[in-house]
Image: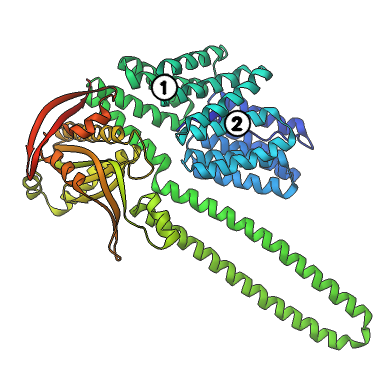
Amino acid sequence: MVFLIHCILLSASVVAQSDPRTYQVCMDGCVTAENAGDHQKAYDYLQQAEELALAENDPVKVGKVYLKRGEILMRLGEYSVALDLFYKALSRFSKVGEQEGMASAYNNVGAIHHYDKNYQKALEYYKRSMQIRRSMGNDRSVAQLLNNFGTVFEDMGELDSAMFYHRRSLAVWERLQDISWMSVCLSNMGSCHTRSGQQDSARYYLQRSMELMPPSKDRNQYAYVAGLMGATYLARGPWERALHWCGESLRTAEEMQQMFVVQQQCECLYKAYDRLGDAPKALAMLKRSVSVRDSLFGQEHAKELTRIDLTHTFEEQQFADSLVEDDRRRTAELEYRTGLAREREQRNVFLFSAVGVVVLALGLWNRLRYVRRSQATLLHEQERSERLLLNILPHHVAEELKDGGEAKARDVDGVSILFTDFQDFSDHSAKMSAQELVALLNAYYTAFDAIVTRYGLEKIKTIGDSYMAAGGLGAPSENSAMDTVNAALDLQAFVQGEILDRAQTGHPSWSMRVGVHTGPVVAGIVGKHKFQYDIWGDTVNVASRMESSGAVGLVNISADTYRRVKDLPGVRFTERGLINVKGRSAIGMYFVERVR
């Protein structure tokens, strides 16, 4: 995911209404401390600014404090707390119609969803911010949002659209002669070229970005660009250059407490050390990368973001409902008073009528409260059901099941199937208790899940000590075979690292065979109760034979898969010739391993 540090700086710029010097001194002091990496001092300034704003009962100033506090927390990876602050700021700006503040809040909420890889929701909030910015004629803010759109499309893999927005943004910054933002746009364009495999062009743009940085350098931007430079060398080598630049980025990100960049660069260093054959350092970086990523994007984090988002939506609806109810009560009261003045002689009758109206209003209010509670409970249960469904089924299958009540089986071409199997599993498991066996399998399979998810594969199932996953089941992709082979290599790297690490502590570990084959399959759901998504066909059987015909510690692929991945950079293929397999004619096979 493209780094968003510069995409979230659309801070509110509303002019303070009273005692601006004292309040503004605090806000300016916060920015200075933040740029110096002193977040505690920045927080102290914000605390003073908030006290002043609350004393003045100024919702705009309070909202600006919440915005800035949320931006700092977002940099530190505290996304759920930051999202809550952005919604609080948005609530205050909305009540007084403060357009500039609303645009900034929408932008930052979009950035949180962008970090969380919820790209459609990120685009939704960026568009809300863009509508306000365009109506205000603020070229700088519009250019910053163009950059945001570019980074979202880049992360979605739509690189042509991403470059379109980055070029539009760069044109505005060149016209405004803003060197700092020109550097940001050039670095994002370099990132797009890296993703498209054009490493020389990527380095050209990244070098230009570094040259435009001021002598003192923006430490956040430098960490980002250094990491991108490391990624270009990670793609093609030399790996030592990847170590240098990713190390530079990691040190700077740690200094600035940029946890998102820290996670990215730990992953970069893990891959670089792995390709250089330094297994202990590679394993250390892999573990740290997984740990930081789980803290940023783990299941509890996702639940909290969802809770905050739903709470905000519910509160918005409550506010709208309260306006309607207030209007209804005012209308009823006006009608009552008019009738009372016109017919004073019927006071007693009207008194009883008023009591009836109050009783009716109370009944309606209680009924309304019951409906709201029921709606909230229903929405919560619906969200839980959808999360459970997506945990069982691929996204496109889950959507089809929700829309039509069933998901039809379909033929899919070019699916790459991955099988793993632990060596001498039965002998090892006989020496372990049931609890130890399940705990060890869970540790391995949890790491496997993270790796296949990173490469966009679908986990199909586990059968005892066998793990099955597939690439290319969703949207067609020319790279699905390469992604599957890369995932297989990472699985072996993880297992080899565990062997070394557990040997030092005296804990048991397993070695593993991995096989990959590519071809057509039939995919669909089986069963009505405890249903399961599965795939069938001869391709599945051949993939299983690739695993059983392989060797411990290596990845064995078929000739069909080899034809699709033979240009994969950073790996070495060893042709094995035609190998006889059980139940069929001989099949061409290749061992594949990363270049050390």
- Vertical order, 253 against 212 (above or below): below
**Element carrying mark 2:** helix
- Residue 230 bears which disc, if any? none
Residue drawn at point x = 18 percent, y = 38 percent: 515
Residue 70, how many percent across, how many down?
57, 39
- Vertical order, 240 against 497 (above or below): above
The answer to whether residue 509 shows anywhere in this view is: no
- Of labels 2 and 1, earlier in sequence is 2
The answer to whether residue 426 shows anywhere in this view is: yes
Q: Are marks 2 and 1 in contact (CB under 8 Å)?
A: no
Label 2 amino acid?
Answer: Leu
Horizontal relation, residue 444 to residue 480: left or right: left
Q: Local crowd at mark 1 within 10 Å, few (<14), some, or many (≥20)?
A: some
Name the image quarter holding the N terminus.
top left
Label 1 amino acid?
Answer: Arg
Horizontal relation, residue 507 to residue 344: left or right: left
Residue at the disc numbered 1:
251
Residue drawn at point x = 66 percent, y = 36 percent: 48
